[in-house]
Image (cartoon, helix red, strand yellow):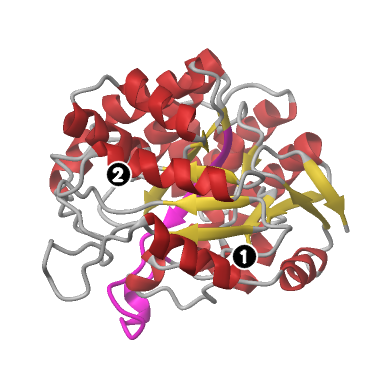
Amino acid sequence: MSMIVNSQERRMAEIAEKVEHGERLTLEDGVFLYETDDLLTIGQLANQVNLKKNGKKVYFVDNMSLYFTNVCEEHCAFCHFRRDEGEDGAYTLTAEQMFDYIDKHYHPNMREFHITGGHNPNVPFQYYVDCIKGLKQRYPNVTIKAHTAAEIEFFSRLSGLSYKEVLQTLMDAGLGTMPGGGAEILSERYRKKMHLVDKASTEAWLEVHRTAHQLGMKTHATMLFGSIETFEERIRHMMYLRELQDETGGFMVFIPNSVQPASVNASIKRRVSAFDNLKTIAISRLMLDNIQHVKAYFINLGTQLTQIALTFGASDAHGTIIQERISHAAGATSPEGMTRDELVWLIQGAGRIAVERDTFYNEIKVY
């Protein structure tokens, strides 16, 4: 027994030394960190790395989540948001309906519209372009963060345009950045098992972000963990992002999100453990040495775990949101949104400095 402990301790000491000297961690290092139960050492290492990168600052943005349509041709195993055309609860909003919703919640300090939605084949690509154009004309000071790489791949099929042409058309209409969704786990085994065969492949997802970065757009990256993927697949996912970041430098933040169970009442066993959530945030901070920020997404973690995550390597607490729908359709028990004051309190309560930012991490106000 003592020999196993010693070899584990020795391995952890080697990794700690690498982190100390700014050496890049390998696939084997990452998998070892997942397999060990020494959460506090991993957390301390991630905290050191984050303090070096970002000091005690934790960022948030005043934003609003928008959903143009929940009609979707995909049937992802984990999604409870999608509907078929004509099904009960299915909707596709016109720009005017979207404006009505925004005007009810809008205030002049809002910085970002975060838009995701279904892959709706019943409307032309132009519908999506017009929605963005309309939003940009009406709210010129708000950054539009819209359409995951999986949506861009879908638009490319819908319109017959290349990724580059799709992105350029959307950028000309007013698109500022892409959210990181649609990545789920970048593994073809996983994508097959989770019924993602028609959704952007690993290669396509990476290629869309590569293209966006080449066009001068900064983007976000996510990972949806906690279902059927292996630890190795999680680490490979991070390494794909790290390699692309070496090449383009276009990712601003990494957002690890755990899978939500199908309903709020689902048994606690079905939720990803707090242990795994914290470990994944810390490991991603250690693996992704070239991405500036790791986000603790309070919608996914709940507010108290988000506070702890801020000493486990996270430097971003997301934003005010107003009303989140996708995670909540899947049984998230967190609030649907938070006020600026609540976010500041959450960050300061963890002994950190709250910084309001814009989409691109320019500081607007330090609290």
Q: Is residue 3 visible?
A: no
* Residue 286, percent from left and from top: 60, 37
Q: Is residue 82 magenta?
A: no
For the point 34% across and 76% down, the residue is 269
Q: Residue at x 28, y 24 (%)?
A: 203
The residue to which callout 2 is attached is 127
Drawn side of residue 173 relative to residue 157, left or right: right
Task: Tell me how far mark 2 sits from mark 1, CA to CA.
Answer: 23 Å
Q: Residue 156's x, y, as percent?
A: 24, 28
Q: Are marks 2 and 1 in contact (CB under 8 Å)?
A: no
Instruction: Answer with left or right where residue 106 lies relative to residue 74.
Output: right
The residue at which mark 1 appears reads as 106
Residue 60 lies, in percent from the top left, at 70, 54
Amino acid under label 2? Tyr
Q: Residues within 10 Å of mark 1 (few under 14, many from 20)?
A: some
* Stretch in magenta: 252-272
